Image (cartoon, grey):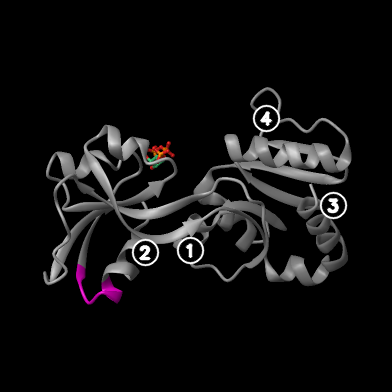
Amino acid sequence: MLTIALPKGRIAEQTLEKFEKVFNEKFLFENRKLILKKAGFTFLNVRNQDVPTYVMHGAADLGVVGLDVLEEKEYDLVKLLDLKIGQCKVAIGLKAGEQIDWNRSIITVATKHEKIAKRFFESKAMAVNIVKLYGSIELAPLVGLSDCIVDIVETGETMRQNGLVVGDTIMDSSVHLISNKNSYYNHKTEILSLRESLAST
Ligand code: PRP
């Protein structure tokens, strides 16, 4: 039986909808339960950022997670399929009217994507002082906590509503089906057949 870690919330619902179409059955986490067993699969309802951890340690064979989260973890996992949901980008956000001075030697960046932000600015030969936040990142430059932010942009509305403008895109992201290498090689037929079914729904 394959175990699949799903990120709580909208992505979990959209992923389970895909499974409903494939297996023609109702897939739903009920009564705040975190484990769902259905049609020969075990689904785990976990935090977004924890999905790669469950998969990497083999607690789940497969996971469903945004590319941004995967890049941030830097684990060596197999990317099986782009599920074409949760499309967004990781981008720089600045106070309207401000620009990044690329000649500066150091910049203070507020973000939950520490590694992605660090890699990006270091590739521009700029040292980074990271201020790690867990949400409402857009506040940071407004109250002088950072020079800019690195955050998820979907519609751009949150930045706009808070007087920020979207700067350079660092990466595009969407939700992917992932696997650890052990599970992939041990259950290859089953995993590839599931991948095919999900790809065609
Ligand atoms: C994410 C992200 C932005 C917002 C972007 O936050 O951090 O704040 O969505 O979406 P938009 O471009 O469509 O406005 P999320 O809702 O995940 O909450 P968070 O602030 O707790 O991270």
Residue at label 4? Answer: 33
The magenta stretch spans which residues? 122-127
Contact, mark 2 vs mark 1 (Cβ under 8 Å): yes
Q: Where is residue 147 in the image (x, y as percent from the top left)?
A: 16, 53
Mark nearer the N terminus (4 vs 3): 3
Residue at horizontal 71 percent and vertical 37 percent from the top: 35
Q: Where is residue 34 in the image (x, y as percent from the top left)?
A: 66, 35
Q: Is residue 124 magenta?
A: yes
Residue at label 2? Answer: 115
Mark nearer the N terminus (1 vs 4): 4
Residue at horizontal 32 percent and vertical 68 percent from the top: 120
- Distance, label 3 to label 1, CA atoms, is 28 Å
Numbered circles on residues, count: 4
Mark nearer the N terminus (2 vs 3): 3
Q: Which residue type carries mark 4? A: Lys
Mark nearer the N terminus (4 vs 2): 4
Q: 99 or 10: nearer the eye?
A: 99
- Distance, label 4 to label 2, CA atoms, is 32 Å
Residue 87 shows in this picture: yes
- Distance, label 4 to label 3, CA atoms, is 19 Å
Residue at label 3? Answer: 1
Q: Which residue type carries mark 1? A: Glu
Of the two numbered discs 3 and 1 in the rendering, the one whose residue sits closer to the viewer: 1
- Distance, label 2 to label 3, CA atoms, is 34 Å
